[in-house]
Image (tube, rainbow, N blue to C red):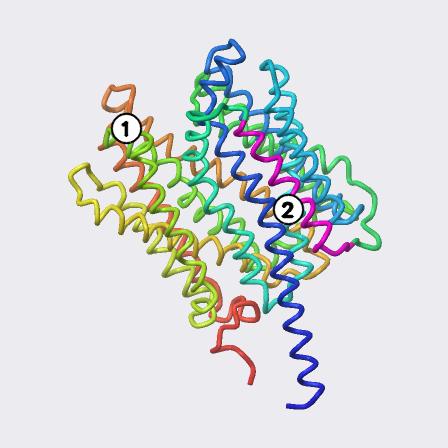
Amino acid sequence: MTTAETSENGQEAASGRQAKIVALVVAVSFFMQILDGTIVATSLPQMAASFDVQPVSMSIGITVYMLTMAAFIPLSGWLGDRFGARRIFLMSIAVFTAASLFCGLSGSLTEFVLWRAVQGAGSALMTPVGRIIVLKNARKSELVQAIALITWPALTAPVIGPVLGGFITTYASWHWNFLINIPIGILGMALVLRFVPEQRETDPGRLDFAGFVLSAAGLTFLLAALELSVKWDGGLLPVISMLAAGIVLSVMATRHFLAVDNPLLDLSAFRVQTFSMSTLSAGTACRVAINATPFLLPLLFQLGFGLSSIAAGTYLLVYFLGNLGMKTVTTPLLRFFGFRIVLVVNGLIAALSIAACGFLTPDTPQFFIHALLFLAGLSRSMEFTALNTLAFADIGPAQRSSASTLSSMLQQVSMLLGVAVAAAVLNIASALRGADNPVLADFRWAFVVVGAIGVMSSLRFLQLPAEAGAEVSGHRKFQKN
């Protein structure tokens, strides 16, 4: 090996280490953000007693967080380009951490709602800007590992959040569900200052204010409709009205972005097949199926099996371990089989394992339940990593900011849509029996419907060319000698 080759290999190794460190730094902040979103629900009754309000009133804390986040997500890419991704990411962590402190110190529902809104604004900027940082610091050959690192918080936090929140609320107080973010946030900011380089676009252009208002309003109404459909408060008319408003505003935003010279969001990313399929069409449907599972499983074990929250948590722990277990083999599998085969075959495994959960009963051997949950966790992890990586496999530098923002917006929609679909099936199945609460048979319908959505979305990936994303996956069949 020549001196030049040795030097080049050394530079590649250093670049790989830098990309991995940056991804780990971003992952720490993502974990804090996603954990907070899942941990809060467990302490709402205790918070209601502390604020001297009805428990149902506390749901506004979750709703205002989600809607504020929806309103500010479209602005994230432009802010990162205008002021520097590192600076905006650091600011988002600081805002989120400070708001967490004041949420934990709140003495009334009004104070709590105010600080949850601020917390949602910080959260809105964190995910898309953090992903932009990772994309700018990782070469295509390093993208699978980098995306896998920032995906694990989304896989693990929703599973361990309710268990951790229940433990903290039971043995400490609800305040610590928010105060726990303080050390994580401080650590995250210190790591960003130490390891994340500053990168800024030379000419981001002026803010497309009209595009911001239309896209923010459209996304807010869509998510509000989905959230309301899950709670089923106020009947069908408000849901349909908000959904219609969200669709109309989103269409207006799309037409605006296509008509102006310097749009807030560059929709040309959707002309890239790998991005459009993994985020908009098949990818959204696939995420709907997978995102419904963490919502259905705790209800299945508690309402269908009659288990306590602690006993249900032990089953979820197995599901969580499955999510972690796939991380070590994700890169080799993508290199060997390529994105198309992995998304189709693994997607079918994920969908069928979801459907199979509907046929579990209290009499099912525990070993079989554990094996099925572990398999569902493995396939969920693999599918999310493959989708998130393929989305940016063919995205050029000029499209990264808009693509990251669009991806975050669609992921928020798919997350709530998955819960809404699952809840709708449970409600319909219960209503057909003339009952108020779901039983084991109703969960069977929910898991089968969600699994069927997963099967259909997985088969859609057959439309991808065999070499799709080969430069990123390192698929050996398409690598140049």
Q: Residues within 10 Å of mark 1 (few under 14, many from 20)?
A: some
- Label located before the other in sequence (1 or 2): 2
Q: The residue tagged with tag 1: helix, strand or loop?
A: helix
Q: Where in the figure is residue 337, as x and y percent of width and height?
A: 42, 70
**Residue at 17% over, 42% down:** 364
Q: Label 1, label 2: how many angstroms apart (C-alpha)?
A: 36 Å
Q: Which circle marks residue 303 in the picture?
A: 1
Mark identifier at residue 132 = none
Quick check: is 404 in the magenta stretch? no
Say what amino acid the circle numbered 2 marks. Pro
Q: Is residue 391 above or below residue 219?
A: below
Q: Is residue 145 left or right of residue 236?
A: right
Look at the image and give the residue range highlighted in magenta. 176-199
Q: Tell me the residue at 69%/80% (across/down).
A: 8
Does 137 sit above or below residue 159? below
Secondary structure, mark 2, is helix
**Which class describes the residues within 10 Å of circle 2: few (<14), some (14-19), or many (20+)?**
many
Q: Amino acid at mark 1?
A: Leu
Residue 9 appears in which quarter of the rendering?
Answer: bottom right
Residue nearest the viewer, comparing 24 with 116: 24
Q: Residue furthest bottom?
A: 2
**Residue 312 picture location, percent across and down:** 31, 35
Residue assigned mark 2: 128
Q: Is residue 229 visible?
A: no
On the rendered structure, is 31 left or right of 443? right
